[in-house]
Amino acid sequence: MLPVITLIGRPNVGKSTLFNRLTRTRDALVADFPGLTRDRQYGIGRVGPGPYIIVDTGGIGTAAEGVEALMERQVQRAIEEADHLFFLVDAKDGATPEDIEIVQRLRRLGKPITLVVNKSDTTDPNLAVADFHQLGLGDPWAVSATQGLGVNKLIDHVFAQLPIDTDETDETAEDDQGIRVALVGRPNAGKSTLINRLLGEERLVTFDSPGTTRDSIFIPFERLGRRYTLIDTAGLRRRARVQDAIEKFSVIKTLQAIEESNVVILVIDAHEGVGEQDATLAGHIIESGRALVVAINKWDGLQPDEREHVREQFSRKLAFLDFAKLHLVSALHGSGVGLLLDEVDKAYANATRNLSTPELTRLLESAVQEHQPPLVRGRRIKLRYAHQGGRNPPIIVIHGNQTEDVPETYRRYLINRFRKALNLLGTPLRLEFKSGSNPFQGKRNQLTERQIKHRDRLKKFTNRKR
């Protein structure tokens, strides 16, 4: 196993910035806003002599009530998993009473701790760390997570103390992420609760308040010998209601998570019904080409007439999702949740299937015989053969003449025929049309050299006879 380094400290001391620096990514959302990080974020450390796991956590030392108490619980679990702790403090603030209180709590754990004085780029390093010797954690390390100053030396120093497995290789650090599954939906739809139910533990902070999740959290997970990466995302609201800068960044991270995923689970709150935002989000998922599973959550709390109303809303507002399987679940009580990953497997398998050219061409010919393409400027569109042009989503390339004039209605007809014949459920299907170039185009009045010679001989013979 790779060694684990956990970043802890007060809110807004730069833990997420250091996490991004050590992983050489932008996975952690960063802003000059205290309490932004709430869940544990894991990544592979790429700065230093070898790989290791780095864990970003929310700020500790806040009021232990409400969502802050749940954040503290997540930090405590991250500390328990750690082989080494980086206790981050702010050089500009000096040693605060909250820092002293946190140090007293950490000493009881018996974990190796390194005191990291962040934001030390604006002053002399010796002056920056002077006030922190009173914490009694040994020599402080002055760094700047933003500029990268002192970070490499810090990792080199600590790496010698980590429990390194000599059989561990970089290949392990880059281990297969499996099927990447993003859970998206409106705020408070129950995405984090659903992931906790799938994992069987309180891995994510859940609170009865919209906007609890702010960042996209990637969680490796294994079930029945198959690997997955579950991606929890921030809830998306209508653009007109998104005014806070943090929420705008959360929206961007959610859209990026959709692009990076293989399968998306669209979570809809049954109590809120199917709204316009759900339809907009579903449209974006289809445009991204991701395989899709729809989960209507909180189903167990509805009366029979309310359930019928939700079904009617789904069939009316999301009629374009006829290829996606609908699941009725309760993340809180677990009903129906166990079937979700089975459907994810099926959707992913369909999205990545290999489709043979003879079969696609045969299906194309059958569809054309049953319903021919329309006439364009007095000439019939001709579709000759088809082959696969890509996977996830499946792309079928159709060759023929005048294909640029194929109407949208006929395109949809072909998509439905291919989907039904190939049983491609759970994934969008794209068609691309290509017209073959006419080799004689532009050469109708041009004579070959042989034809020119023959013409000249014919003229000479005619002149002699005259």
Image (cartoon, rainbow, N blue to C red):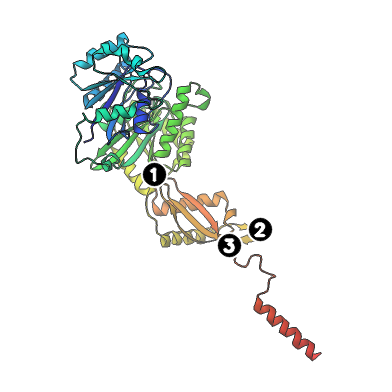
Amino acid type shown at disc 2? Arg
Quadrant for residue 79, please give it: top left
Q: Is residue 81 above or below residue 423?
A: above
Task: Tell me if mark 2 has few (under 14), some (14-19) or many (20+) residues whose alpha carbon lies within 10 angstroms of its own.
Answer: few
Residue 434, image x and y in percent? 54, 57
Quadrant for residue 27, please give it: top left
Q: Which residue is mark 1?
A: 426
Closer to the N terminus: mark 2 or mark 3?
Answer: 2
Quarter of the image that includes the N terminus: top left
Q: CA distance from mark 1 to mark 2?
A: 38 Å
Q: CA distance from mark 3 to mark 1?
A: 36 Å
Q: Which residue is mark 2?
A: 377
Numbered disc 3: secondary structure:
loop
Residue 389, image x and y in percent? 45, 54
Whether residue 336 is visible? no
Numbered disc 2: secondary structure:
loop
Closer to the N terminus: mark 3 or mark 1?
Answer: 1
Quarter of the image that includes the C terminus: bottom right
The numbered disc on residue 267 is none
Q: Nearer the viewer, residue 399 or 91?
A: 91
Quadrant for residue 363, please give it: bottom left
Q: Is residue 139 above or below residue 81?
A: above
Q: Which residue is mark 3?
A: 437
Residue 53, image x and y in percent? 27, 32
Q: Residue at x 49, y 24 (%)?
A: 242
Q: Nearer the viewer, residue 40 or 272?
A: 40
Whether residue 363 is visible? yes
Amino acid type shown at disc 1? Gly
Amino acid type shown at disc 3? Ser
